[in-house]
Image (cartoon, grey):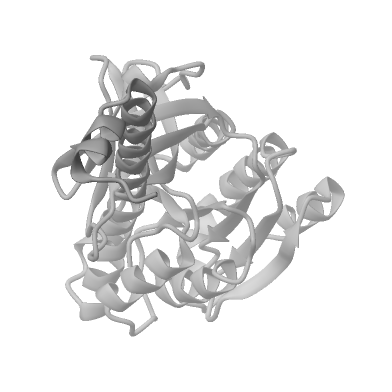
Amino acid sequence: MRLGRSSVRIMSRHPLVRLVAGAAVALFISVVLVAQTLERVLYVSVWDQATRAPITGLGPDAFNVREDGNRREVLRVTPATSPMSVAIIVDNSQATTPTIADLRKALTGFVKSLDGLGPVAIITVADRPTILRDYTTDQKQLQEAANKVFALPGSGATLLDAVVEVSQGLGKRDTDRAAMVIVTTENREYSTRHYQDVLDALAKGGATMHALVLTGPGGTQMTDEARNRASVLDLGPKASGGTRVDVLTSQAFDVKLQELAALLKSQHRVVYARPQTLIPPEKIVVSATKPGQTASGGPARGQAVR
């Protein structure tokens, strides 16, 4: 039997038909909205500005995430529990001779405080980047390596070479978060790399750079090598979501490295929504919403801005 137009109109007005059609439209809209957003992950440390003590247990309302100046919705926040690869780059060139004992003491304490966070490597930069201990969680091996850090007579620093080589190595590791910790004085640089090339390598490696710098007369040098070194130590932490701390005496190495260890071990995993676009953002910035608190962090590895 063939149905006429009037029969079709009557069927389309049936409550059950309208209900099914409405549900289908709602499902279609939901699928489209989900397809238009991506969930992205940041690993973020938060600390008190006055005491530099880490702050934990925060929720979505504690973070402000912006991509190229556009605010993004923070969906959820949990404690960071995945392993973190940590590369410690130590300046042991001749210029560090007066401070090397304090540095070695601070380094052994720092390595101990990182226990349980993830694999740690120790690299020195006198004359050329040298791996004292490759990535391991074995505290005995790490302590032995830390105690072998001595200033090398007649040597110069190759810090920028080390940053590039360590970044390349980190790029091959499968941990979804990583940190590069630099402990150095302001002295002569023997690497000939341009600072932008070093920053590009840092971004590709996906690590956050943390620099602890003993300031001194070496910072007044005006050579190209010195300017490139200064630019990396200044811009690297900012671009990667890390930190830079300047100290006036090597005796402060111990305290500042302990503060850094506490920050690295108290990170939050921040998940936020990003609208789906053809061009990824050039700049991701996370900040704390509460006055008196500072937040710093970067994307999970594989999500770093290229």
With respect to residue 178, does 17 lie above or below? above
Front position in the image: 238 or 213? 238
Q: Quadrant of residue 130?
A: bottom right
Q: Is residue 303 left or right of residue 246?
A: right
Query: How far across and down, in percent of the image, does residue 290 sit?
Result: 27, 15
Task: Please tell me how many numbered marks the rendered image carries.
Answer: 0
Residue drawn at x 67%, y 39% is 114
Q: Quadrant of residue 90?
A: bottom right
Q: Is residue 305 left or right of residue 92?
A: left
Residue drawn at x 58%, y 44% is 102
Q: Residue furthest bottom?
A: 192
Q: Residue furthest left?
A: 69
Query: How far across and down, in percent of the image, does residue 139 sit?
Result: 81, 46
With respect to residue 24, does 279 lie above or below? below
Query: How far across and down, in percent of the image, does residue 121 sit?
Result: 67, 59
Mark yes or no: residue 54 visible.
Answer: yes
Front position in the image: 27 or 129? 27
Q: Is residue 116 left or right of residue 54?
A: right
Residue drawn at x 63%, y 65% is 173
Query: How far across and down, in percent of the image, does residue 262 sit?
Result: 56, 29
With respect to residue 158, does 178 lie above or below? above
Q: Is residue 111 left or right of residue 262?
A: right
